[in-house]
Amino acid sequence: MSDSQKFPVAAHALAYLAHKQANASERAISSTELAASMPTNPVVVRRVTAMLARAGLIDTRAGAGGGAWLKLDPGAIRLDAVLRAVDGCTHLGVAPAGAKGCPVGELIPDAVRAAITAADTAASERLSRITVADLLKTPSGKL
Amino acid sequence: MSDSQKFPVAAHALAYLAHKQANASERAISSTELAASMPTNPVVVRRVTAMLARAGLIDTRAGAGGGAWLKLDPGAIRLDAVLRAVDGCTHLGVAPAGAKGCPVGELIPDAVRAAITAADTAASERLSRITVADLLKTPSGKL
DNA sequence: TATTATGTAACTGCTTCCGATACAGTTCCT
DNA sequence: AGGAACTGTATCGGAAGCAGTTACATAATA
């Protein structure tokens, strides 16, 4: 796993759906329209929306007039759920295995892993206090 | 910027130096010994120790009997400083630019960027409460 | 049936990473 | 003085991952 734009794309897409009040199949937004607002490619958007749909955050439907719409209230979609939906983590790296036979080298990796996990958890906890609705209420970029 | 093992390698190296009580030039540890405990290549270690030295966390010296040693007490080296020293961040992605002319597309990126920054700050704050000394006191992998 | 849309596979070009080799400069030891 | 040990950095190769694109099977509408 490595650097990826999936989280920002997902957050942007959800905020766009919220702004358009796409909350039912009749108000579905196509990947083409979502992509145009990034801007990026419709396939890139669909790769993300498919993951959001699997996570139960949105619904999608194929066919004419199809697209994506929110399954939940924007205020109920927390960004930590979005991050998990797209397989995100803080990517601080993976602790090296540690040399066998070296007592220090064997114990340190666990502690390093624990530190990375702690940082990841803290980031996730912070995101859990931000909802998609907050993204729309924040024109100044302040949270 | 992207995925990188620099932070784990740096944390491991610092913990190893602390365990060996390498706190003066006479107790310098070579990159070869540090690399053997990961295990990885000595050059990879030197790339990281050079950054830690620039950040003032360790000192290094070339030549026979040279190597790296801690400049600070292990309890005074906080992991957020280590992360900064190796150019680390949480890598949740970069908010897409947003389409010009689209009022939503123009405002959302700022909010997404703010959310990413908030998460990054939270992770860093969590790391600031962990020191290199803590890494050695944590055989069970709990922090 | 023609049109519009999703989901996914496959390909390209790009970037970044680790690991390795090489080498100039530094320091210690004999 | 000369050799051995060590750092810092340049460079290269192979591997991996990503964005973006084309293509296509499937699905839903009109």
Image: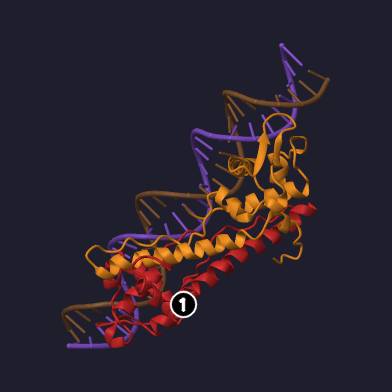
Chain colours: A red, B orange, C brown, D purple
Query: Which of A67/D13 is in front?
Result: A67
Q: Is residue D25 above or below residue B95?
A: below
The residue indicated by pointer 1 is: A78
**Quadrant position of residue B69:** top right
| Quadrant location, the C terminus of chain A | bottom left
- The percent coordinates of residue C22 (x first, y second) are 58, 29
Q: Is residue B63 left or right of residue A57?
A: right
Pointer 1 local density, CA inside 10 Å: few below 14, some 14–19, many at least 20: some
> Residue at coordinates 69% horizontally, 42% vertically from top-left?
B71
Query: Which of A61/A109 is in front?
Result: A109
Q: Is residue A13 left or right of residue B45?
A: left
- The percent coordinates of residue B55 (x first, y second) are 59, 43
> Residue at coordinates 69% horizontally, 49% vertically from top-left?
B14
- The percent coordinates of residue A79 (x first, y second) are 46, 73
**Quadrant position of residue A98:** bottom right
Badge count: 1
- The percent coordinates of residue B100 (x first, y second) are 24, 62
